[in-house]
Structure formats: C-alpha cells, structure tokens
Amino acid sequence: MQFLKILFWCLLAFIAAVFTISNWNAVQIQLWGGLIADVNLPLLLFVTFLIGFVPTMLYNHAIRWRLRQRLATCERELVELRTPRPEPVAFAHAETPVAPITPVGPATDMSTATPPGSLL
C-alpha cells in the first residue's frame, strides 16, 4: 500500500512539472490603483490553490482537535464510571450503658453559686 501512495505522489509531481514547463507564460494581473503585475501562470495557480486550501485545512484541524478533546473527556468520564467504588460499610452501633440521670437539687444549682473572686 505504501508503494501505491509513493507512486501516486510521484505521478502527481510529474504531471505538475510537465504542466509548469509547458505553461511558463507571464500573465498580467490588474491590481488596485492601476497597478499591473506580471506573474508566471504556474505560480499564480499555486497561490490560488493555497488561498483555497489553507483556510479549509485549518478549519478541519480545529474541528478534529475539538472532537479529540471531547472524546478524551468522554473516555475519562467512562473510566471513572467503570471503576468500582468501595461500598459503604454499615457499622452496627453497640449498646453502651447509659448513666442514670441524677436530679439537680438546690445544693448543685449553678444559679445560686457565687462567682469567683466575690466576697460573701
């Protein structure tokens, strides 16, 4: 397959060389302000080809880059979703003995206590 690709590009280069040699004519291009440029026809055709090809190629590369970024994001999310998460462990609460509640009487009432540093 690689041989066919090389053969195709060599054939294309040969056809371009034959076209260039047989059409090496000066072409007049009228520019703004009454200027006239003499340009060889193969160079003119190459420049017009690049004017059409380069923006399309840049647009294609931008779209492919954006799609690769989206695909990588989706693949990361998929891997994250497929990884097993540890299941939550349910702990059984042990019965702890509860101390009995003692009633608060007037002797232990904090409202009648004197603040520190006060004289009685």
Image (cartoon, rainbow, N blue to C red):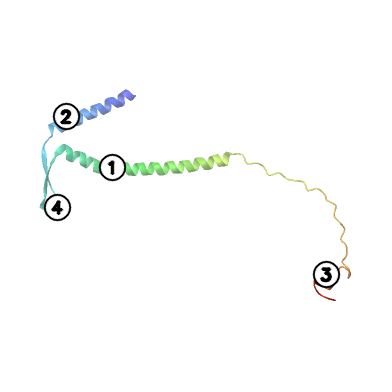
Kind of residue at badge 2? Val
Mark 3 lies on residue: 110
Discs 3/4, front: 3
Rendering coords of residue 64 (x, y %): 39, 41
Q: CA distance from mark 3 to mark 2?
A: 111 Å
Asked if residue 27 lies left or right of residue 60, the reply is left
The residue beneath circle 4 is 32
Residue 100 or residue 77, whichever sits in front? 100
How far apart are labels 3 and 4 at the CA level?
Answer: 101 Å
Mark 3 vs mark 1, foreground winner is 3
Vertical side of 92 occupied by 119: above or below: below
What residue is at 10 percent from the left and 52 percent from the top? 34
* Mark in front: 3 vs 2: 3
Instruction: Decide: is 6 above or below 69.
Output: above
Tag 3 secondary structure = helix
**What mark, if any, has residue 54 been given in the picture?**
1
Which secondary structure, mark 1?
Answer: helix
Which structural element holds mark 2?
A: helix
Dot 3 alpha-carbon crowd within 10 angstroms: few under 14, some 14 to 19, many 20 or more: few
Q: Residue furthest bottom?
A: 120
Q: Residues within 10 Å of mark 1 (few under 14, many from 20)?
A: few
Q: Earlier in the sequence, mark 4 or mark 2?
A: 2
Residue 8, percent from left and from top: 27, 27
Q: Tell me how far mark 4 sits from mark 2, CA to CA.
A: 33 Å
Could you say whether the residue bearing mark 4 is in a helix, strand or loop? helix
Kindly identify the residue that appears in the image at 21 percent across and 41 percent down: 47
Quadrant of the rendered structure where residue 113 is?
A: bottom right
Identify residue for label 2.
Answer: 18
Q: What whole-number distance in Å separates the C-alpha atoms at marks 2 and 1? A: 24 Å
Tell me if label 4 and label 1 are in contact, CB under 8 Å: no
Task: Tell me the kind of residue under disc 3.
Answer: Met
